[in-house]
């Protein structure tokens, strides 16, 4: 079997080229089709037999999974948080690459594809089987559609789940933050700002709801965190029109199921008290990310510590574990151990100034390969 460092040296240029080509393909959530097609072409080109695109636009490569109920998943998401449908601005020099979405999670996808290449070229047959997955719809209102589809298609057959979705080796998600997301729309009679003065204004109604939401005391529970946010407000017609309609997107999050349920009741109470004879309120749930279910604590700790040890070995840093909202939410909700780790060093995630350190990608590929070989093959490969 080819030594890992030799493979990395021989494929470093290809890793960077894949990343450049992926960055040039826009991929808002629910619109990842072109990136999915690119990933499938790459996998087919390296001889990944059986790779396919599923109903959720996931690109799935099952390796030695026939009849297995102990598969390991390695995943990275193809969508970006940005709504752009034209290629995003790209800059590269000797040290860095700058592009919105480059680290979250385009580089993770590039690393995953090179991992698959290593396994195919070395003709490795992991005993429990590995699913290499370039999954869709991780961001925002994608609502984890891709990972939901994966776990529906392979229900009861996945033993553990690792996703590459962090812009630092120093951070690791091993606890899942659940969330509920809503669109709230207020409607009123509206009218001319002078002639109809006194009619209810939909923007004012919405503002009242926002004020009440921001007066909510969050549940306090040791070891957990609960938050809420109004992230987008739209509405109105003009400066001289009493707004007939206004909408907002809002959410609450928690890494504790009881706290999440408490917030659900509180938000429902605020929504229910709004409106009246001169205003109507429509509430639509736009997304729901579950908290962790009954995950075996021993198995979860073992997976977390295994990945931490590999990152320490390769990168000389000890990752700090924390809670987060990632593709891990779905396996955690189903009782499957899962972690989210970084395969790069960068910053500015979810901003248009996002960047990564090019030199970190080879370390990231080494982390990914050593993790896949040790977890997927259940042996101490070197």
Image: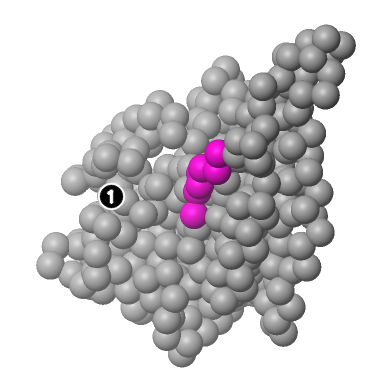
Left or right relative to 42: residue 93: right
Image quarter (top left, top right, bottom left or bottom right) of the C terminus: bottom left
Seen from the viewer's position, the closer of residues 102 and 274 is 274
Residue, disc 1: 61
Residue shown at 60% from the left, 39% from the top: 281
Residue 59 lies, in percent from the top left, at: 33, 42
Main SS, magenta residues = strand
Vertical order, 155 against 212 (above or below): below
Q: Residues within 10 Å of mark 1 (few under 14, many from 20)?
A: many
Secondary structure of the residue carrying tag 1 is strand
| Residue stretch in magenta | 282-288
Q: Is residue 153 magenta?
A: no
Residue shown at 49% from the left, 73% from the top: 292
Residue shown at 79% from the left, 34% from the top: 204
Left or right relative to 170: residue 134: left
Image quarter (top left, top right, bottom left or bottom right) of the N terminus: bottom left
Residue 112 lies, in percent from the top left, at: 44, 50
Viewer can see residue 352: no
Seen from the viewer's position, the closer of residues 293 and 132 is 293
Residue 366 lies, in percent from the top left, at: 53, 60
Viewer can see residue 219: yes
Residue 240 lies, in percent from the top left, at: 83, 11
Residue shown at 84% from the left, 18% from the top: 197
């Amino acid at each position: 079997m080819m030594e890992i460092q030799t493979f990395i040296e021989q494929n470093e240029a290809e890793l960077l080229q894949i990343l450049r080509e992926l960055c040039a393909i826009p991929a808002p959530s629910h619109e990842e089709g072109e990136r999915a097609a690119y990933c499938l072409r790459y996998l087919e080109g390296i001889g990944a037999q059986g790779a396919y695109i599923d109903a959720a636009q996931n690109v799935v490569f099952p390796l030695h999974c026939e009849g297995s109920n102990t598969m390991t998943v390695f995943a990275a998401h193809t969508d970006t948080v940005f709504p752009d449908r034209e290629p995003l601005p790209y800059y590269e020099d000797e040290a860095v690459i700058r592009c919105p979405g480059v680290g979250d999670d385009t580089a993770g996808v590039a690393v995953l594809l090179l991992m698959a290449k290593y396994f195919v070229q070395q003709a490795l047959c992991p005993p429990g089987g590995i699913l290499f997955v370039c999954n869709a719809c991780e961001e925002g209102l994608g609502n984890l559609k891709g990972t939901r589809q994966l776990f529906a298609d392979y229900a009861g057959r996945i033993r553990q789940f690792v996703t590459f979705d962090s812009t630092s080796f120093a951070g690791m998600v091993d606890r899942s933050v659940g969330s509920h997301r809503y669109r709230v729309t207020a409607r009123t009679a509206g009218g001319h700002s002078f002639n109809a003065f006194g009619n209810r204004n939909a923007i004012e109604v919405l503002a009242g709801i926002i004020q009440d939401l921001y007066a909510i005391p969050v549940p306090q529970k040791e070891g957990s965190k609960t938050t809420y946010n109004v992230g987008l407000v739209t509405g109105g017609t003009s400066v001289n029109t009493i707004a007939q309609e206004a909408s907002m997107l809002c959410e609450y999050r928690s890494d504790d199921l009881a706290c999440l349920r408490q917030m659900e009741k509180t938000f429902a109470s605020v929504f229910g008290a709004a409106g009246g004879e001169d205003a109507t309120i429509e509430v639509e749930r736009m997304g729901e990310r579950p908290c962790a279910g009954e995950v075996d604590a021993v198995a979860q700790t073992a997976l977390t510590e295994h990945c931490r040890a590999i990152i320490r070995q390769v990168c000389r840093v000890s990752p700090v574990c924390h809670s987060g909202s990632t593709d891990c939410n779905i396996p955690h909700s189903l009782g499957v151990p899962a972690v989210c780790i970084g395969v790069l060093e960068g910053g500015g995630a979810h901003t248009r100034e996002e960047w990564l350190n090019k030199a970190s990608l080879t370390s990231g590929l080494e982390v990914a390969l050593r993790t896949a070989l040790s977890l997927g093959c259940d042996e101490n490969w070197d």
